[in-house]
Image (cartoon, grey):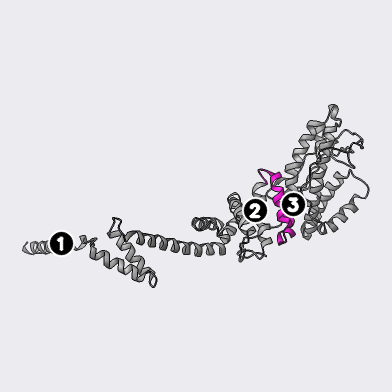
């Protein structure tokens, strides 16, 4: 019993001395302020980690703002920001190497929060959507900012090998992010992407998507307008002839885009592309003699010609012409009306292109009659792979 009591007494004694030791805290005295501030001041340039620890200790002990605390807090905040940036940049480099695109977006946002005009980070985020479709809409926001910075003369290395290369891919992002909701609005971005001197202009996928945008956008709109403007018994009217002239301009752009895709296609896809192009070309030219030769000539020469811009709307037909009216529509949707040469209503489509939905256009002729439908296009082959978002391009 006496031993137990002695042990309890010893425990009480040690407890009495231990409690004050644990409870000891530094006091914000003038001596503490002077010594700690001096430690920060002496180390602020030659040993910043030591200066940082002194500043943190000062701010934790002296919580009331004084003549020293403002400078120390500014130092601590800047030190934290710089170290966070260094960490984020290192992790961003790792995310790029690992092709972790969601991480690239997350870390990029953290860096841009304090450095919004960082062109490299905007470029990384601006093209991430090409490799991860779930990021495409968000990626487009940074693509727009990156385009502004690049056009203002900011360097594009090491992510891209040239200014044209960067602008081509950035505009391609804007096209792909827009094409589903507004294919007509996407067309100028596709055209820009194709006109820059980059490896992108040599990829058939770009032109398949351009052809699809023409089909889903202006072609579909003009087909509906044509149907609304034909007269009783589906006879032509001056208004429907004008719409038809504009519609044929769009079909010609589709043919050009599909011809470029065919010319650039690899051996595995070339025949399928050629078959699809021939079908559309025949439809546009009303099955004229020598159509096959015309298609071959077009494919052989199309890459030597400038990519045509979106067509300028035709607002009036020549008064000297008296177009021959023919009721549009047939079982295959290839009825024709002569307006300014050989004209067709609608088209047979260009297959499907990734990111654009179906590019099959319903012919206005078949819609007018409601007795048939446009010829079903052959399936488009698996498109060329999308460009990978590597740290270097080209």
Q: Residues under labels 3 and 2: Cα distance? A: 15 Å
The image position of residue 285, as x and y in percent, is 88, 45
Query: Residue 321, relative to residue 382: is it above or below?
Result: above
Tag 2 residue: 173
Tag 3 residue: 208
Would you call the spot at circle 3 few (<14 residues within 10 Å), some (14-19), or many (20 or more)? many
Is 376 in front, or is 112? 112
Does the magenta portion include 206?
A: yes
Would you call the spot at circle 2 few (<14 residues within 10 Å), some (14-19), or many (20 or more)? many
Q: Residues under labels 1 and 3: Cα distance? A: 82 Å
Q: Residue at x 81, y 53 (%)?
A: 259
Quarter of the rendering occupied by the N terminus:
bottom left
Q: In this view, does 328 lie to the left or right of 388?
A: right
Would you call the spot at circle 1 few (<14 residues within 10 Å), some (14-19), or many (20 or more)? few
On the question of residue 109 being in view, the answer is: yes
Q: Which residue is drawn at 72% across and 50% down?
A: 209
Marks 3/2 in contact by CB < 8 Å: the verdict is no
């Amino acid at each position: 019993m006496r031993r137990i009591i002695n042990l309890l007494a010893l425990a009480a004694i040690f407890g009495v001395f231990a409690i004050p030791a644990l409870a000891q805290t530094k006091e914000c005295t003038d001596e503490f302020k002077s010594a700690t501030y001096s430690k920060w001041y002496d180390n602020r340039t030659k040993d910043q980690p030591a200066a940082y620890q002194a500043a943190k200790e000062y701010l934790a002990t002296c919580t009331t703002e004084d003549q020293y605390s403002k400078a120390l807090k500014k130092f601590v905040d800047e030190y934290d920001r710089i170290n966070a940036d260094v960490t984020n940049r290192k992790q961003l480099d790792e995310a790029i190497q690992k092709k972790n695109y969601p991480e690239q977006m997350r870390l990029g946002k953290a860096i841009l929060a304090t450095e919004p005009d960082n062109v490299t980070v905007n470029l990384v985020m601006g093209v991430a959507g090409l490799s991860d479709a779930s990021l495409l809409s968000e990626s487009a926001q940074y693509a727009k900012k990156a385009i502004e910075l690049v056009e203002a003369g900011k360097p594009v290395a090491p992510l891209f090998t040239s200014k044209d290369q960067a602008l081509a891919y950035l505009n391609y992002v804007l096209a792909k992010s827009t094409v589903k909701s507004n294919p007509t609005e996407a067309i100028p971005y596709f055209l820009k992407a194709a006109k820059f001197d980059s490896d992108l202009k040599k990829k058939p996928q770009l032109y398949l998507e351009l052809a699809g945008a023409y089909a889903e956008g202006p072609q579909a709109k003009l087909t509906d307008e044509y149907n609304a403007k034909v007269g009783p018994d589906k006879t032509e009217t001056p208004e429907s002839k004008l719409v038809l002239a504009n519609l044929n301009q769009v079909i010609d752009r589709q043919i050009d885009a599909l011809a470029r895709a065919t010319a650039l296609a690899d051996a595995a896809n070339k025949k399928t592309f050629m078959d699809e192009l021939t079908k559309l070309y025949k439809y546009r030219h009303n099955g004229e003699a020598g159509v096959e030769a015309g298609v071959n000539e077009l494919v052989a020469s199309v890459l030597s010609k400038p990519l045509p811009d979106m067509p300028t709307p035709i607002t009036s037909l020549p008064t000297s012409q008296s177009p021959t009216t023919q009721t549009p529509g047939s079982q295959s949707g290839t009825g024709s009306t002569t307006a300014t040469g050989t004209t067709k209503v609608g088209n047979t489509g260009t297959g499907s292109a990734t990111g654009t939905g179906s590019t099959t256009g319903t012919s206005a002729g078949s819609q007018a009659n409601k007795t048939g439908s446009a010829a079903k296009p052959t399936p488009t082959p698996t498109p060329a792979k999308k460009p990978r978002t590597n740290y270097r391009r080209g």
